[in-house]
Image: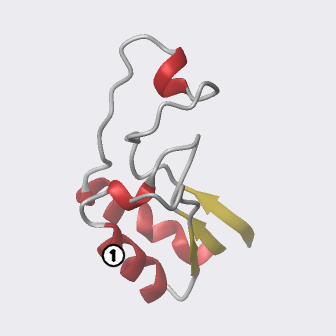
Amino acid sequence: MLDSIQIEVTSRCFLKCVMCPNITLPKWDSRDMDFETFTKISKYFPYAKLIYLQGMGREPLLHARIFDLIRMVKNAECRAGFTTNGIK
């Protein structure tokens, strides 16, 4: 059993923090993970206690289907977590 699985559901963010790859890497591709990919990954959710929907400073609340993603995590009887900048 894993403590957590971290999934970067979006690479988008509207901030320009100096330490973020969105700023420091050239031609950053900002987009959301498609729902079908997330669905495929979801079969592994029962192996973890927490599914963390964020990575590398992105804003997970920008994902158009964030509530559907959270619902899938909860349906797998896992805790859902994410970090937000609180601006959106």
Q: Residue at x 29, y 39 (%)?
A: 31
Write down the quadrant of residue 17 in the picture. top right
Q: Is residue 87 visible?
A: yes
Q: Name the outermost residue toward the top.
A: 26
Q: Name the outermost residue toward the front.
A: 87
- Measured from the top left, where is residue 79 in percent x and y? 60, 81
- The quadrant of the picture occupied by the N terminus is bottom right
- Measured from the top left, where is residue 16 in percent x and y? 48, 30
- Under circle 1, the secondary element is helix
- Measured from the top left, where is residue 7 in percent x and y? 51, 54
**Crowd around label 1: few <14 · some 14–19 · many ≥20 (10 Å):** few
Lateral position of residue 3 relative to residue 87, left or right: right
Residue, disc 1: 67
Lateral position of residue 29 relative to residue 5, left or right: left
Q: Is residue 7 above or below residue 50?
A: above
Q: Is residue 77 above or below residue 3?
A: below
Q: Is residue 48 visible?
A: no
Q: Residue at x 53, y 72 (%)?
A: 45
- Measured from the top left, where is residue 47 in percent x and y? 63, 73
Amino acid type indicated by mark 1: Phe
The front one of 40 and 68 is 68
